Structures are given as structure tokens and as C-alpha cells.
Image (tube, rainbow, N blue to C red):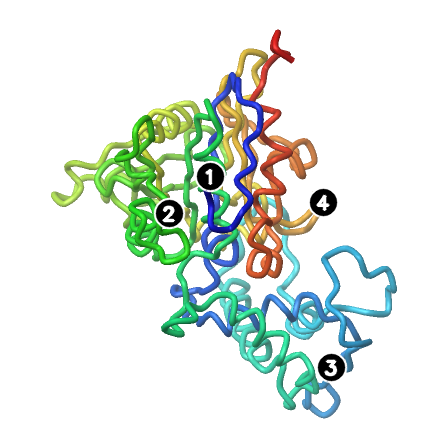
Amino acid sequence: QSTWGYLTSMDGKFDKKLVLHFDVNKTCVMEDRAGGKSVRQVLLDVVAERVYGRGSDAAGVPRFDAADTSLYAPGTVTDPSLVSFKQWVDGLFPYPPHAPGEPYSVEDAALCSDRKAARRKLMALFASPDTGTEAFAPVVDAAEAQLRDPSSGNAFFFVTSFLAAIEWLAAQPGLDFTVVFRTFGDDLATVHEKFNAFCEGKDPRFPHVRCDGSAPGGRDLRIDAERGMGRVYLSGFGPDDIALLWGTTEKPRLGALDSFLLEPARERVEVARGPQAIFDSLVARGARGALAVGDYYEWWAACGEQECAGKPMLVDRSPDACVVTVFFDDNLNPPGSPTNIVAPRDAHTGASIALADVYGTLAFTADPYEVATDPRYYIGILGGVLPLLRSRPHAAE
């Protein structure tokens, strides 16, 4: 029985396998080690996305006047004169215009980098008198308290809502599922260490959990450092321009995959080339435990953060599909947005799938504030996903 008190079991009889992709930063972890952001700095960003008002930058002095002290969920503010603190910051430092599907020029890429740094500098001043938003400091404090071990004060690596969902899924009779961590960062070694510790009952919030194969009939969900970690490589938009390198998390330089693989240190790297081979490898390797995969930021950035160059989400849409792919990412924008981070593709052909076809059913925008503060957040969403794993009604139903 969970100490959190919500291990309600759904009726089993699942016909399909669930492959669950989780972005790392602000989706299941509230710190950004690759970006050098602490838990508090990440929470400043998270709360700033929910504070609406009007901003100014008169004489180079940034000030933001919040409409009130409430926090608003994304998409709930209808007054066109109001923007979130984050939207205001982004508007002060816009990226240059860009043609979809085309890489940025060297000059525009450098400009994007400079403006991204300027955005980050101003975002760090949220909840302070420097921007007139000090009223929200207690909100950030309260959220941060939920992410720290009360006995030591140290920050937990994984948020409770993510680990609670894994515990809940593991308790579902007959459910076959795989977790795939996806990140642009360099934090997979820590993901491997902390997730395996959770599976072994070493997380103080879940001391009763045993997802290491030691429980009778239980699966081993731990990440195998040799077979369960890899790196995506992208160099174009066709099916031959995507590969998944198993056995390394290092990044090849753009356009230098073949020379990368010829290096002596890569002799044990196994390469899945093309969408079908990658999809099959995810399913096969995921049968032995969770997976940790680094995505290819360089291609996404070179293409102006366009959806078509984002993290590949391979979906089997054939009539006899036996695998359901789900993706959670806090940076996933609604369909029609000028930029996006997840690229839905057909698992067999690699052809692009319209985000609108999977958004809200298979691809979900993780709400970082809810992720950080509501332990049941992911369980609530996944409760609506599990019925998709039944291909037909069962006689008992």
C-alpha cells in the first residue's frame, strides 16, 4: 500500500504495451543541471508562467505590474491586454523571424543565443523588488518546500508526482509498460542513479517500493547502463536522417556521425537507423527496464526550434498496433505554435504526424507547477490513457 494513499487499481486485461516518454527538466525533475539552474531558479520560471499583468521597460528599467496575486493555469487568461511574466520577457527579447524547416544562419543563431541569455537574466529577477514582483516570493517558497526532504533540507531529484505515477503503474495488474527518459541535457547519469535507487526502495518517500525484480512476480524497471542508455542523432527530415545510438550518450558533431562511430571508443555502440529500427529497439530494450535517451539539441537549435526538428515521437498507427506511445514534455506547445519541441512521426515510415492528431491524447504538455505541487498529477492523466491499451471489449466487461 502506498504511503501516499492512492494506489487505486484499474481493471486490467490490457492488450497493448505502453511506452512512456518523459522529458526530464521541469517534467519529472525540478532542476536544470545542464543549464546551471537550481531548484529555486527553475521554480521562479514555473511560477512566472502563471503570473499575468502588464510590463514595461521604460528607460531600460524593467517593471511588471501583476493584475492580482493569483496564479493562472495556461490558457485560462482571456484578456488580450494581459501577458504572463514569461511572455513579457520573451517579447522584450524576440528571436529573429525564421522559415519553417530551414536552419538559422550563423548570424541569426548567434542572435538567438544572445537573446536567450538576456531572457534568462531577466527571468532570474522574478519574485523580487527588481521587477516589482516580490509578492510572489512566498508562492515560490511554498512550492520549493515540497521539493525538499524535510529531514535534511536537500532537494529531491525526482518530483513526487512522477515517482508516484511509476508506483501506480507498477501496481496495475497485467500492465506492460516502459519508461523512456528524454532530455537535451547531460543529466542522464544522474537519472540512471536516482531512478535505480527509487526502484530499489532507497527514496525516503517510497521506501516500500521494489521495482528491481526482487518482489515475487515483480518486474525490474531499473535502467541498464550498458543496454538502456543511448543518444538520438538527427541530420535532416527524412527517414534516413535519424538514428539512435545505443551504448553511448555522447553527441556526434552535426554531419559527423560516421567518423564518430569509427573512433575506437565506439566499437561497442549499436546503431538503430531509421524510424522502424528505432521503434523496434525501444520496445525490445524497454522490455528489460527503463531507458534513458539523450536527444539532439544541435539539430533542433539549428532549425530554429521548429517542431519538425524536435524530439522524435514514434507512433504506430497501424490497425493492428500493439504499442501505445505517450510523451510528456513541459515545453510542448499547442498545435499551430511557431516552435515546438516534440516531433510526432509514423513509426514505420518516419512521415510527420500532425501534432493535433495526438495532442491531449498521446502527447501532453506537462504543467510544471502542477508537477511540482500535486502528487497525483500524472496519475490523473494516465488514468485516461490506460483504456487505450485495450484493443477490444472483454467478455467480463
Discs 1, 4 touching: Cβ within 8 Å: no
Among numbered discs 3 and 4, the one appearing first in the sequence: 3
Q: Residue 47, located in which quarter of the rendered image?
A: bottom right
Discs 3, 1 touching: Cβ within 8 Å: no
Q: Amino acid at mark 2?
A: Gly
Distance (Cα) linking label 3 and label 4: 28 Å
Residue 23 in the image: x percent, y percent? 48, 49
Which label sits in the foreground, 1 or 4? 4
Residue annotated with mark 3: 64
Mark 3: secondary structure: strand
Among numbered discs 2 and 4, the one appearing first in the sequence: 2
Mark 2: secondary structure: strand
Distance (Cα) linking label 2 and label 4: 26 Å
| Label number found at residue 336 | 4
Which label sits in the foreground, 3 or 4? 3
Q: Residue 81, located in which quarter of the rendered image?
A: bottom right
Q: Is residue 253 above or below residue 88?
A: above
| Label number found at residue 294 | 2
Among numbered discs 2 and 3, the one appearing first in the sequence: 3
Residue annotated with mark 1: 236
Discs 2, 3 touching: Cβ within 8 Å: no
Residue 396 in the image: x percent, y percent? 61, 10
Which label sits in the foreground, 2 or 4? 2
**Is residue 131 among what the camera can see?**
yes
Q: Is residue 262 above or below residue 397?
A: below
Circle 4 packing at 10 Å, graded few (<14), some (14-19), many (20+), is few
Which label sits in the foreground, 2 or 1? 2
Q: For this view, does 262 lie left or right of residue 279?
A: left
Distance (Cα) linking label 1 and label 4: 21 Å
Among numbered discs 2 and 1, the one appearing first in the sequence: 1
**Is residue 253 among what the camera can see?**
no
Q: For this view, does 195 lie left or right of residue 378?
A: left
